[in-house]
Amino acid sequence: MNDFNFISEEAQIGKNFKIGKFCIVEKGVIIGDNVILEDYAIVREGAEVGDGCFIGTYTKIGKNARLGKRVKMTSFGEIRDNCVVGDNSNFGSRCTLSAGTIVGNNVIVKYGFVATDTPKIGEKEKLTCILKNNTKYGAAVVILPGVTVGENSEIGACSQVRKDVPDNEIWYGMPAKKYKDITS
């Protein structure tokens, strides 16, 4: 431990782990090989970070979150408790995945993204957002509670997604609406 980091003795750390300054790795965390944890990052109890992940400055990984291989989360992000993120998914700065969000493989998210989980402030009910494989999101997109975005779909910048998006469609707007089908 150097640079004022805290790594629990009950954490499992893989080979070639690189850690910045002022980081916290709590008990029960599993960090894979070739992981980079930048300054001020926090990995909470029971989280798993797959091989080759990059966790940026001031980013928090919540309790029992699961990150696949080669996930990249740039600065000021938050993956809250019990989220699951698939392999090769990338997130820009200031992204938040609310508790329980499920993200598929090969998902690309630009900065300022939020997946929400609470339909009404003050209520305990939480609804899971699901972002399926190969989906793409522009900057400043908000996904409302319980919404599923289908495989290969794309959401335009500054959109608010209020209902499920089928596979292979492009949506944008506030509220987001279908623009067109994605054809191969």
Image: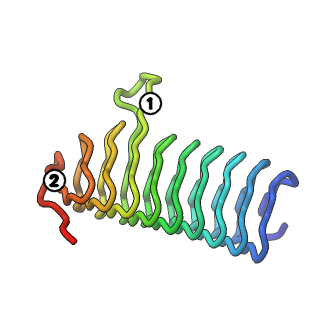
Q: Which residue is mark 1?
A: 126
Residue, x 32% and y 50% (percent of image)?
Answer: 149
The quadrant of the picture occupied by the N terminus is bottom right
Residue 60 spot, x, y in % from top left? 59, 54
Q: Which residue is mark 2?
A: 173
Residue 154 spot, x, y in % from top left? 26, 61
Tell me if I can see residue 74 in this picture: no
Q: Residues within 10 Å of mark 1 (few under 14, many from 20)?
A: some
CA–CA distance in space, label 1 to label 2: 25 Å
Counting residues from the N terminus, which is met first, the one under dot 1 or under dot 2? 1
Indicate which disc residue 144 carries.
none
Q: Nearer the viewer, residue 172 or 18?
A: 172
Residue 101 spot, x, y in % from top left? 47, 45
Residue, x 17% and y 45% (percent of image)?
Answer: 175
On the rendered structure, is 180 left or right of 120?
left
Q: Amino acid at mark 2?
A: Gly
Residue, x 27% and y 54% (percent of image)?
Answer: 167
The quadrant of the picture occupied by the C terminus is bottom left
Residue 128 spot, x, y in % from top left? 43, 38
